[in-house]
Image (cartoon, rainbow, N blue to C red):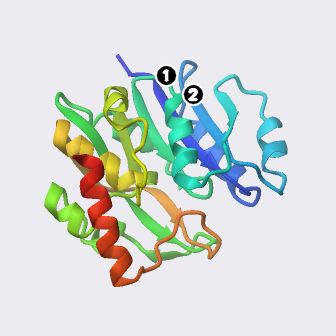
């Protein structure tokens, strides 16, 4: 029997792409699934776009305006179903993403992460495989040294919520933290198939920019402290 899913989406000033993202998700959801959208105070028409959907599966809640990590924490905290998918506001899911991910949750698997194609704002492919580009692999030590976990490609069992919430503060990256806790509590699994178009357009709320050496070292100490 198919498990019910929750999609935890953090939104902020997302008017340009959020409808395209939502449409790619809703067509894959069943009646008892849900999309929990935590919307930080925005200055554009994001809330109006979300309110235009008359779909009981969409649950709109308001974030505190404390940034991306807290916004995701708020969305995750309000989810209720068996499997929780993390979701950005500006990507596009392939039409087989949900089925492929759900089929990968065998016994003992806490977190599943799939590959994605990195695209520009017009969906032109920049890198066909994030996994190859990032040299993605599992392993606690490996992912402390160089993080491979990317939230928009991750899903996890609801049982993990009791171990990850509330997020410790400070927390450099919520997706890295969730992935590492999953490896500590059970097993994680990779799907070597792109199931998402990961849009990079210069105004993403999440960033792939490089940090200073000092900040990189500081973040590693923070993530070690968080998982301990």
Q: Is residue 152 left or right of residue 21?
A: left
Tally of numbered discs: 2
Q: Which mark is residue 115?
A: none
Q: Are marks 1 and 2 in contact (CB under 8 Å)?
A: yes
Is residue 139 visible in this depiction of the protein? Answer: no
Task: Name the residue tied to disc 2.
Answer: 34
The residue located at (56%, 75%) in the rendering is 124
In the rendered view, would you say 135 is above or below 139?
A: below
Q: Which mark is first along the chain, 2 or 1?
A: 2
Q: Identify which residue, 145 or 151, lies in the foreground.
A: 145
Q: Quadrant of residue 12?
A: bottom right
Return the x and y of residue 118 as percentages of the image width and height: 46, 70
Q: Secondary structure at mark 1?
A: loop
Image point 69% across, 52% down: which residue?
A: 18
In the image, is residue 132 above or below residue 25? below
Q: Dot 2, crowdedness within 10 Å: few (<14), some or many (≥20)? A: many
């Amino acid at each position: 029997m198919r498990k019910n899913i929750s999609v935890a989406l953090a939104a902020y000033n997302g008017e340009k792409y959020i409808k395209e993202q939502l449409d790619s998700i809703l067509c894959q959801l069943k009646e008892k699934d849900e999309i929990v959208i935590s919307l930080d105070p925005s200055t554009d028409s994001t809330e109006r776009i979300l309110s235009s959907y008359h779909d009981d599966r969409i649950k709109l809640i308001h974030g505190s305006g404390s940034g991306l990590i807290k916004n995701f924490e708020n969305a995750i905290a309000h989810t209720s179903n068996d499997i929780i998918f993390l979701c950005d506001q500006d990507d596009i899911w392939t039409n087989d993403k949900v089925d492929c991910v759900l089929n990968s949750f065998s016994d003992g698997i806490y977190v599943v992460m799939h590959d994605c194609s990195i695209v520009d704002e017009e969906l032109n492919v920049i890198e066909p495989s994030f996994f190859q580009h990032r040299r993605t692999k599992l392993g606690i030590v490996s992912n402390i040294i160089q993080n491979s976990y990317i939230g928009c490609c991750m899903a996890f069992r609801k049982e993990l919520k009791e171990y990850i919430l509330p997020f410790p503060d400070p927390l450099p990256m919520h997706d890295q933290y969730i992935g590492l806790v999953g490896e500590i509590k059970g097993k994680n699994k990779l799907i070597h198939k792109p199931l998402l178009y990961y849009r990079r357009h210069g105004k993403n709320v999440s960033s792939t920019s490089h940090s200073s050496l000092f900040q990189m070292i500081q973040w590693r100490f923070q993530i070690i402290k968080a998982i301990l």
